[in-house]
Image: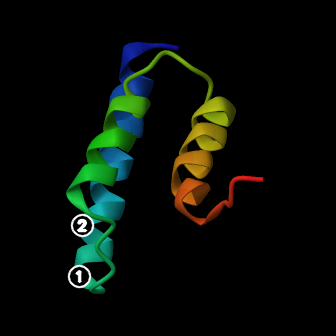
């Protein structure tokens, strides 16, 4: 994936975080930092979305 697309992915996350803060919907700095690190990886957008959703949902999944 070209570097400018990875930068765009990170910028989009930062913009979404700023928008969430305005609406008092903070995702937390730890989670934001995890997503930013994930966004810097050279993976497809589909893989990024899959991994990001897995991180988001992991606290709510029960161990079976």
Between 60 and 37, the residue placed more toward the observer is: 60
Q: Quadrant of residue 60?
A: bottom right
Number of numbered tags placed on the structure image? 2
Neighbour class for label 2 at 10 Å: few (<14), some, many (≥20)?
Answer: some
- Residue 18: numbered disc: 2
Rendering coords of residue 46 (x, y %): 68, 35
Considering the numbered disc 2 on the image, is that residue within a helix, a strand or a loop? helix
Q: Do the numbered discs 1 and 2 sit on residues whose CB atoms are within 8 Å? A: yes
Q: Quadrant of residue 10?
A: top left
Q: CA distance from mark 1 to mark 2?
A: 6 Å
Q: Residue at x 27, y 85 (%)?
A: 24
Judged left or right of residue 8, residue 30 is left
Rendering coords of residue 31 (x, y %): 33, 52
Rendering coords of residue 47 (x, y %): 65, 30
Q: Residue at x 32, y 38 (%)?
A: 36
Where 44 falls versus 42 (above or below)? below
Q: Which residue is mark 1?
A: 22
Where 34 falls versus 18 (above or below)? above
Q: Extreme bottom residue here?
A: 23
Q: Extreme front residue here?
A: 64
Rendering coords of residue 58 (x, y %): 57, 54
Where 10 falls versus 53 (above or below)? above
Judged left or right of residue 61, residue 28 is left
Q: Residue at x 24, y 76 (%)?
A: 21
Between 15 and 28, the residue placed more toward the observer is: 28
Between 45 and 34, the residue placed more toward the observer is: 34
């Amino acid at each position: 994936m070209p570097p400018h697309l990875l930068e765009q992915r990170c910028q989009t996350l930062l913009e979404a975080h700023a928008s969430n803060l305005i609406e008092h919907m903070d995702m937390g700095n730890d989670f934001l930092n995890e997503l930013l690190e994930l966004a810097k990886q050279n993976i497809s957008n589909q893989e990024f979305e899959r991994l990001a959703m897995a991180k988001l949902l992991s606290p709510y999944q029960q161990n079976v």
